[in-house]
Amino acid sequence: MEEKLRELQTEAEAALQAAATEQQLDEIRARYLGRKGAVRQIRQSISGLPEEERPLVGQACNKLQKTLEKLVAARQDALAEGQDDAAAAGETLDVTLPGRTPRIGRKHPLTQTLEDAVSIFLGLGFSVAEGPEVENYHYGFEALNYPADHPAMDEQMTFYIGENTLLRSQTSTVQIRVMEGQEPPVRVVVPGRCFRRDTVDATHCHTFYQIEGLLVDEGVTMADLRGTLEAFAQGMYGEQTHVRFRPDFFPFTEPSAEFALSCTMCGGEGCRVCSDTGYLEIGGCGMVDPNVLRNVGYDPEKYTGFAFGFGIERIAMLRHGIDDIRLFYSGDMRFLAQF
């Protein structure tokens, strides 16, 4: 058996030396070291040898395998080096050709819109806060006053990583973290990425960006909320833009409202884009629910506040006249290079 192993090593060394391509090298590797290769077949036959010979043959097989593996690696390096040398020899440089102008990158349209929105709110006296994208049940729902049977908690709506761990579906989770860490007054905006189990279409995506706003202080009213959102709308779309509130429901605000902007396409006159209403819905807002304030240790008899949130993709679509959210994530440079 030892003689057979020596012959096998001599045969394998000769085959490896003759290998001229990566494909040939792979075939030789499989022939000798593969699952059905010669070395494995010898290993499988060891059980049929006399008991005193088995350790010696096993050690010889191990030694042969290591030797062949080193030879294969060395031959692979030699082939790669030879290919590099051949490629280098075939390259020529024509110094008379004009130089290539490097492509200069630019910010993604969503990044531009998000930074512009944050800049407007900074000018209104807000600061920026951030939080984790992977949240627990408490910050995702419980502290935000969601009832235990709210459909947003279903697995059909939210990405769950574990029983108590989920991907945040809104940046409202950071509101709780901010209020837990400081006493009023609180004035923050929270930009960030969110995740929902939405079917991807022209207006929905499972991953999207959102900006959330929160202001808590003494004497804050719905009028302050409207004035803040109107100042934002005019900063983003121009002084001719106005805000409209309509009653709505959100677990963490009471009263709650859907807010819309006067249509950027028709200036509020009514068109196909706004379904002849003159307004386009942007997001939700309202006064912070007293239960949310109690959850973070604030006295709702002393403090009031408002919160709002909207998607950055929707703001960018209205800003640039884009009709399909999927374009933002397509990676198509013909689209992205316009911004």
Image (cartoon, helix red, strand yellow):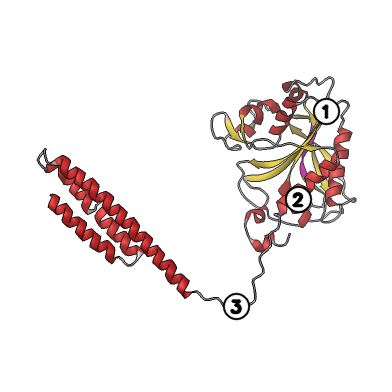
The reply to whether dot 3 and dot 2 touch (C-beta < 8 Å) is no
Horizontally, is 106 left or right of 84 in the view? right
The region drawn magenta spans 282-286
Answer above or below: position of 239 versus 121: below
Identified by mark 3, the residue type is Val
Residue at point 55%, 76% (across, down):
93
- Element at badge 3? loop
State the residue in front, 312 or 156: 312
Quarter location, residue 333: bottom right
Residue at point 87%, 48% (across, down):
234
x and y percent of residue 152 in the render? 64, 34
- Element at badge 2? helix
Residue 304 tag number: none
Q: Name the residue tied to disc 1.
A: 185
Circle 2 crowding by C-alpha within 10 Å: few under 14, some 14–19, many from 20? some
State the residue in front, 138 or 41: 41
Residue at point 64%, 76% (across, down):
98
Q: Name the residue tied to disc 3.
A: 95
